[in-house]
Image (cartoon, rainbow, N blue to C red):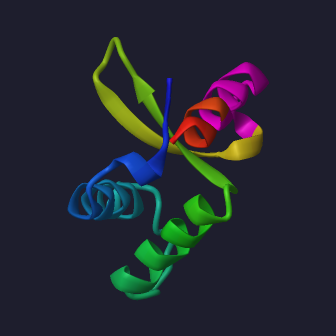
Amino acid sequence: MLIPFEQLAADTLTRLIEDFVTRDGTDNGDETPLHTRIERVRCALEKKQAVIVFDVESQQCQLCLRHDVPREWLADLDALTQAN
C-alpha cells in the first residue's frame, strides 16, 4: 500500500526519511551531511520520483523509486492525492 507523504505529520515524515537515509548500506561511503540527504529524499517525494510503501504484514514503511512500484498501486495513490 502506498501512503501519500502529504498525509504524514512533518515530524513523522522527517523521522521516516532520516531512518531510511541512515540504514546500513545506504550511505555507500557518502559523506554528505544528514540534512542534505533528508532534503534530497523530501524533494524526490515532492517531485513524485519516490513514494512511501507500507507493508501491512510487517507494519514497516519503505521508500521506493516510483518506477519500482506496480502501476496499480500508483493509480490508487494518485486517486488518494487527488481526492484530498
* Range covered by the magenta-colored residues: 68-78
Residue 28 in sight in this render: no
> Is residue 56 within the magenta segment?
no
At x 67%, y 55%, the residue is 48
Rendering coords of residue 6 (x, y %):
44, 53
Residue 69 in sight in this render: yes
Q: Is residue 80 left or right of residue 60?
A: right
The quarter of the displayed image where residue 55 is located: top left
At x 45%, y 85%, the residue is 36
At x 72%, y 37%, the residue is 68
- In the displayed image of the protein, which residue is found farthest to the top? 57
- In the displayed image of the protein, which residue is found farthest to the front? 83
> Is residue 73 within the magenta segment?
yes
Task: Considering the whole magenta stretch, tell me its main secondary structure.
Answer: helix
At x 35%, y 80%, the residue is 34
64 shown above or below 40: above
The quarter of the displayed image where residue 83 is located: top right
Q: Is residue 3 left or right of residue 46?
A: left
Q: In this view, does 1 lie to the left or right of 21?
A: right
